[in-house]
Amino acid sequence: MEERDLAIVTGAASGIGRATAEVFARKGCDVAIMDIDNAVEEVAAAARAAGVSCHHARGDVAEEKDVEAFVSEVLERFGRIDVLVNNAGVVLVRPVEEIAVEDFRRVVDVNLGGTFLFCKHVIPVMKRRGSGSIVNMGSVSGHVGQVDHSVYGATKGAIIAFTRALAWEVAPYGIRANSLSPGSVDTPMLRGDIEIESRKTGLPYEEVKKIREAEQAFRRWASPQEIAEAVYFLASEKASFITGTDLLVDCGWVAK
Ligand SMILES: NC(=O)c1ccc[n+]([C@@H]2O[C@H](COP(=O)([O-])OP(=O)(O)OC[C@H]3O[C@@H](n4cnc5c(N)ncnc54)[C@H](O)[C@@H]3O)[C@@H](O)[C@H]2O)c1
């Protein structure tokens, strides 16, 4: 990426999205960040302090009117969108028979629907410039079966499949599309998973955490920054011949 490219990062108030916005800003990219959580304001302030321009908004990636409004604000302010990182996501840890239809729909609408809506509204902008790079957030859950993660895993598998088709669709316009599948990353989302497992098993949180860390090849979780650096690589010109792929950043989880 050249300096002053503009990168959109969704779900940037926390975890991987926050680290991704910080990495892009540190590397000299202007950023536009959207999240349903007010903490997006702090991330915007930090990006501005790093010396780049930042547009931020509270919004729901599952709502087309929010996505449309955000994309047109970004376009009005920066006149370009070089990178789109569809990171916003929610997890659902529950056995299938206990999942309410509304919860099923919400996870699909946010994870897959949000990715679709942002692609729908950003791709015309990228097409006009004849360039662009899209990174959609997958997960190891889209590759392997994880107990109580059926609906979440289905949305991530769908994002990976969506991205493969998208890559072929947008390639004639100079646009790349890839997904990235993290393993265990130390964020509020994963910590919430551990709390649920701790309640289910009756084991203390720290003990469950130790067990889950011991399952990793390096016996530790990733930091959000390690994922953010991989997102940056995939979005950047360094990855100019990479499209339609899923980059596993999972410490060997799927390789086992
Ligand atoms: N943490 C992990 O171990 C892990 C592993 C694999 C994949 N992922 C994926 O990485 C992405 C980021 O997860 P994280 O671990 O940083 O989680 P997180 O909960 O720390 O952050 C997710 C962010 O998305 C935002 N968000 C949720 N719903 C939204 C909506 N409808 N509209 C706008 N923003 C919304 C949240 O407010 C939050 O700021 C997700 O797509 C997740 O599925 C995480």
Image (tube, rainbow, N blue to C red):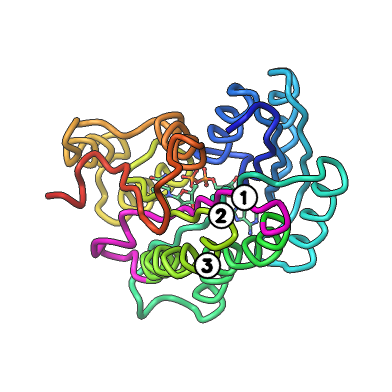
User: What is the secondary structure assignment of the residue under circle 3?
Assistant: helix
Which residue is denoted by mark 1 in the rendering? 131
Which residue is denoted by mark 3 in the rendering? 112
- Is residue 153 or residue 115 the one in the foreground? 115
Kind of residue indicated by mark 2 = Ile
User: Above or below — where is 137 with respect to 104?
Assistant: above
Horizontal side of residue 37 vs 234, given as left or right: right
Task: Specify whether tag 2 is near ligand 1 (CB below 8 Å).
Answer: no
Seen at 38% across and 70% down, the residue is 154
User: What is the secondary structure assignment of the residue under circle 2?
Assistant: strand
Pointer 1 local density, CA inside 10 Å: few below 14, some 14–19, many at least 20: some
Pointer 2 local density, CA inside 10 Å: few below 14, some 14–19, many at least 20: many
Q: Is residue 138 magenta?
A: yes
* Residue 30 location (% of width, % of height): 71, 32
Seen at 51% across and 61% down, the residue is 171
- In which quadrant of the rendered view does residue 217 lie? top left
Kind of residue indicated by mark 3 = Leu
Horizontal side of residue 31 vs 173, given as left or right: right
- Is residue 147 or residue 139 the one in the foreground? 139
* Residue 70 location (% of width, % of height): 79, 54
Which residue is denoted by mark 2 in the rendering? 175
Is there CB contact under 8 Å for labels 3 and 1? Answer: no
